[in-house]
Amino acid sequence: MYRRLFYLLVPVTLALIIAVGVIWHPWLWLLLLWVPLALIGWRDLNSTANVLYNYPLIGHLRYMLEFVRPELRQYFFESETSGRPFSREQRNLINARADGTGDTSPFGTIRDVDAAGYNFSFHSMAPRKVPDEQRFITIGGPQCTRPYRSSRLNISAMSFGSLSGNAIEAMNLGAKQGGFAHDTGEGAISPYHEKHGGDLIWELGTAYFGCRHKNGRFDAETFRDKARRDQVKMVEIKISQGAKPSHGGLLPGAKVNQEIASTRQIEAGQDCASPPAHPEFSNPRELMAFVAQLRELCDGKPVGIKLCLGVRHEFLGICKAMIETGTLVDFIVIDGAEGGTGAAPQEFSDRLGVFIDEALPFVDNALRGAGLRDKIRLVASGKVALGYDMVVKTALGADMCNAARPFMFAVGCIQARRCHTNKCPTGVATQDPKRARAINVPEKAERVARYHRATLDGFAAITGAMGLERFDALTPDHIRHRSSYAPARGYAAFELPRLNDGQLLGDDIPAAWQADWRAAAVDHF
C-alpha cells in the first residue's frame, strides 16, 4: 500500500514544486530537499531491509528512533533503581562521592524492601569505630618474599586499548594520590600506567601481551625485566573473565593503533584476539609450575590467579595441585559472571559463569576445606560499587575487593554502552584522541581518589554500625537475604555445608562436597 503511495507522491510533489516555482521562484529551493529524499526513497524500493522495502523513506524513522532508544530509556523512562547494569541511583551516588559532595537522600528508601533478592543487615545498639589500619591488608603467602600492603579496594582489570590513554592515566594518578593499586588488565603495561607511578598489578592474559614472542608464547626475559620494576607490586594470571568466561579477549582492529600495537607487541590495525586458554599450561599441576616460575622471575612478589568460577571440581583440582606440588598462589581474584567488558558475545555474558555472591562462599569454603585459606587472600571482583557491596562481599568470604566500572564513572563514563564502537561519547572507552581529550586527567584523578576514599568510609561506617571493629569479623549470617516474599534469612542458609579447616583432607567430607572432590584432578581441568 505505501509503496504504491510512494510511486504516486514522487511525481505529484515534483509537479507541484515546479508549478508553484514557475509563479514564485524561491519555491524551487525545495528541490534541494526533494531530490535527496526522492533518491533515498527510490533506493529503498530495492532495499534488502524489509521495513525500508515496504515503507520507503519513512521506514528510516524506525532506525532513527532505535538508534536513540538507549538514551531515551536512560534519560526519560528509567527509574532510579531499574537501570542495568548499574542503576541511576548507584551512578548518582558514585558521582556524588567522586565530586566530594553530599550523598544523603531525603524521605526514605525508594527500594522495595519486601522484594526477592533484597539484602540488608542488622545494626547494633553499641556501634563501634573500625580503626583506619583495617583499610589495608598484606598480600603474600609463605612463599612470597616481597609482600604487598594493599588497600581493601583497588581498581580492577581494565586494559589500555579497551580504555583510552587519558582514562588510564587519570585512574593511575588517582591510585597514586589515594594509596591504592591499579590492575593493568591483560593489555600490558602502557606508558599511561607508568607516567605517574601508581602501584600496579600486572595481569597476564592468555596472549601474554607485553611479554610475548611473535608466536604468542610467554617471553620470560621480557617479563623479568618489567615485573621487577618497583611500580609493579603483584602479578595476576588471568585464567578467565566474568563477562566472557572461557572466551578470549577481543580488541577490534579499529581500536588497535600504533601505540597499542607497540604496547601489546602486536600488529596495528588488526583485530586483537586472545586465545581462550593459556598455551603455557593445560592442567592444575602445570599452572602451579607457571606460578612458581613467575614468582622467581618477579623476585618474590605476590603471584595470584583470576578466574570466574565455573565447573566446581576444576577449582578443587587447583586446590589439590597446590597441596600436591607445595606451590601456593598468594591471592585469588574471583570475577563474578555479572562483570563487564568492552565487548563480549551476548550469550556468554548472559548465561555462563557463577555470579559473585554464589562463587565467593564456595571458593572460601573450598580453600578452608583444603587447609589453604589462611595462606591465600581472596579478592572479590563483581559489581562492587558502594560501601555495602564491600560489606556483603567480605561477609561472603572476600578479604578485599576490586572495582572497575565505578572507577570508569569517576573519570566520566555515563554508561552509554558504546564501548565496542570506538565512539564512546565521554572519551573513556575509545582510542579516538579527539574524544579522549574530554578527560581532564588531574581533575578526574581527584575524583578517582575521592570516590575510593568515600567508598572505604562507607564500608567502615556500616561495619561499625553493625557492632564490629574488624572487617574480618563479618560472616554470611551478617547479611540477611530475602529469597522470596517472605522473612529474610542469613546467607549461610543458602550455602553448601560449611567446611572446617582441612576437612576435605580427611574422611569426614560432607555429602554435598564428595562428588566434586573426587572428580577434582591435578592432571586435567
Image: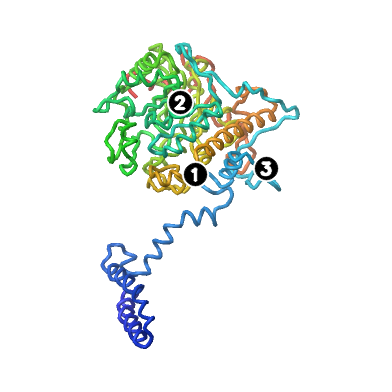
CB atoms at circles 3 and 2 under 8 Å apart?
no
Residue 89: x %, y % from top left: 59, 46
Q: Which residue type does callout 3 highlight?
A: Thr
Residue 97: x %, y % from top left: 61, 39
Residue under label 1, please give it: 413
Q: What's the distance in space between the residues labelled 3 and 1, CA to CA?
A: 22 Å
Whether 159 is drawn above or below 231: the answer is: below
The secondary element bearing badge 2 is classed as strand
Image mark for residue 44: none
Q: What's the distance in space between the residues labelled 3 and 2, CA to CA?
A: 33 Å
**The quarter of the displayed image where residue 260 is located:** top left
CB atoms at circles 1 and 2 under 8 Å apart?
no
Q: Which of 283 and 34 is in front in this view?
A: 34
Whether 47 is drawn above or below 171: the answer is: below
The secondary element bearing badge 3 is classed as loop
Q: Which residue type does callout 1 highlight?
A: Cys
Whether 258 is drawn above or below 110: the answer is: above
Q: In this view, does 512 lie to the left or right of 259?
A: right
Q: Is residue 508 visible?
A: no
Residue under label 3, please give it: 104
Q: Nearer the viewer, residue 465 or 295?
A: 295
Q: In this view, does 401 lie to the left or right of 347?
A: right
